[in-house]
Amino acid sequence: MGFNCGIVGLPNVGKSTLFNALTATAAAQAANFPFCTIEPNVGRVSVPDERLNKIAALAGSQNILPAQLEFVDIAGLVKGASQGEGLGNQFLGNIRETDAIIHVLRCFEDDDIHHVDGSVDPIRDADVIETELMLADLESITKQIDNIGKKKRSGDKKVEAQCDFMEQIKVKLESGEPVRSMTKSLDEDQTRWLKSCQMITAKPVLYVCNVSEEDAAKGNEWTKKVEEMAQKTGARVVRISAAVEAEIAQLDTEEERYEFLETMGLSEPGLNLVIREGYKLLALQTYFTAGPKETRAWTIPVGCKAPQAAGVIHTDFEKGFIKAETIAYDDFVNNGGEHGAKEKGKMRQEGKDYIVQDGDIILFRFNV
């Protein structure tokens, strides 16, 4: 399973600078004027996980393959985007394809960097974008209701139920609430219908407070307000300085990066924070495969059963699933690897109903 996040925000809040820093590339043109990003830039980065090296050392692996995280840097949104203002239509089309929204909010003052609304106010900025996304969703769901309404006349009970559910979505949006506020109470059919509706505001949100270098360690008044807003809405929030991340990306060695972080009063790069919160946001976790050739991390949803986890490696693994030979991470490390874990009876034979746990080291047995 991929992890795909669209980086959004008003123009000039630091989206492209953040994207460049996170992916350590210059693919996104970071410039001090609106709409410098026109086509969405896509960058894949390795998910840092200290467990990988420990597993690889014990397994004698030649190669280490971390999980991958995908960022999409999307053009800046402005008020009126739902009616096509700025690059609105393109923005909305791009963001529908992502799994989650990383919403960058400007939480720093700088007279040299123009703010599209003339002043810094991350709460207002968040509201502008959320409103535009809700308006876009409202237009979309209205059209979908009109289309399904024709089928509703057939008397099909399932179609009637789906249409009624879509009407509930419309009411929610008309009341000024994003669709994600209703996602926790959905049944199986409603969850499937919602997915087919492709509502942007159903996607989970991670607010990234972009602060100055001086505020990177402790934040400021703006970041406190964003944290309060996120708590009320059920969103997640991290605080990073895109400027600091850009400097880190230029350093050659891991040692240099952590020395620099220490001088800034930080314990880890912002990328780690974004990934960790992003995993929580999408309810993701990691399992591992390990052997002489390679140790590899695989990303799956929390609650994923063994056959579906096997299918992430290859569809044949899921189709012909027999069992999953499983060792918990702590058991693998504490007993010197696979051989020691086996000797201590720590390797388990798990079947089709086993729910994979974060950190499991698994060997799948299958037959096609």
Image: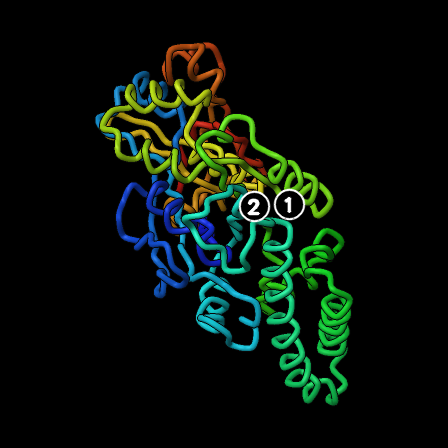
Q: Amino acid at mark 1?
A: Ala
Tell me which residue sits at (40%, 18%) in the image. 262
Q: Nearer the viewer, residue 279 or 206?
A: 206
72 vs 246: above or below: below
Provide the secondary structure element on which disc 1 rests: loop
Q: Nearer the viewer, residue 7 or 179?
A: 7
82 vs 124: above or below: below
Tell me which residue sits at (47%, 69%) in the image. 93
Which residue is the site of mark 2? 206
Q: Is residue 106 left or right of residue 264?
A: right
Tell me which residue sits at (68%, 60%) in the image. 178
Residue at the outermost front position:
111
Residue 359 percent location from the top left of the image: 48, 27
User: Alpha-carbon distance for marks 2 and 1?
Assistant: 6 Å
Which residue is the site of mark 1? 235
Residue 259 percent location from the top left of the image: 34, 18
Quadrant in which residue 290 is drawn: top left
Q: Nearer the viewer, residue 332 or 40?
A: 40
Q: Is residue 176 left or right of residue 131?
A: right
Residue 6 visible somewhere in the drawing: no
For mark 2, does the 10 Å Cα neighbourhood hold few (<14), some (14 to 19), or many (20 or more) residues?
Answer: many
Q: Amino acid at mark 2?
A: Leu
Tell me which residue sits at (77%, 74%) in the image. 164
Q: Nearer the viewer, residue 296 or 216?
A: 216
Provide the secondary structure element on which disc 2 rests: strand
Q: Are marks 2 and 1 in contact (CB under 8 Å)?
A: yes
Residue 107 percent location from the top left of the image: 54, 42
